[in-house]
Amino acid sequence: MLSPLPWWNDLFVNVPLALAFAWIISWFVPSLFTASFVVGYWLTNVLGFVLLHKGGEVLISNQPSKYTRKSFLKDAAISLLYTMVILLLIRFKVVQPLPEYLTHR
């Protein structure tokens, strides 16, 4: 479930974690919602890839890891696409800071 490789990891793990991170930050500083959402998403994404890389090194310690430039560019492109989706969701108020959900009800 936590592997960063399948497409659904971003949808079901990274984005919800980033949203929770953004809600916590924006609870104290509402103007940081968008920035903290994007930063939280990138942190969970990068952390996932680093953990996967390190785990692979431990499992196959006698061979160098093979994370190619092509793989990196593909992962970066997918992350940028999800970042654009996150920004659109914020722009169209599909996701908002938690206090805004609570005050508009």
Image (tube, rainbow, N blue to C red):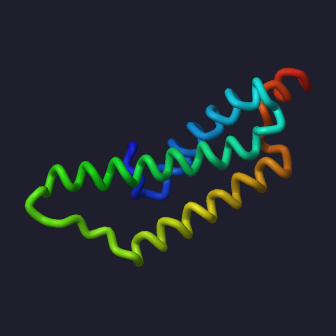
Where does residue 17 sit, x and y in percent of width and height?
A: 56, 37
Where does residue 29 sit, x and y in percent of width and height?
A: 79, 30
Q: Is residue 60 above or below residue 73?
A: above
Identity of the residue furthest to the left in this view: 62
Where does residue 19 sit, x and y in percent of width and height?
A: 65, 38
The quarter of the image holding the N terminus is top left
The quarter of the image holding the C terminus is top right
Q: Is residue 32 above or below residue 45?
A: above
User: Which residue is at a point 18% across and 66% down the rendered structure image?
Assistant: 64
User: Which residue is at a point 40% across and 72% down the rendered structure image?
Assistant: 71
46, 99: nearer the viewer: 46
Q: Is residue 16 left or right of residue 29?
A: left
Which corner quadrant of the image does residue 98 belong to? Answer: top right
Q: Is residue 19 left or right of residue 77?
A: right
Where does residue 86 sit, x and y in percent of width and height?
A: 70, 52
Which corner quadrant of the image does residue 60 belong to? Answer: bottom left
User: Which residue is at a point 48% across and 66% down the rendered structure image?
Assistant: 75
Identity of the residue furthest to the bottom in this view: 70
Q: Is residue 98 above or below residue 49?
A: above
State how many labels appear. Answer: 0
Identity of the residue furthest to the right in this view: 104
Which corner quadrant of the image does residue 68 belong to? Answer: bottom left
User: Which residue is at a point 23% across and 54% down the rendered structure image?
Assistant: 56
Q: Is residue 26 above or below residue 42?
A: above
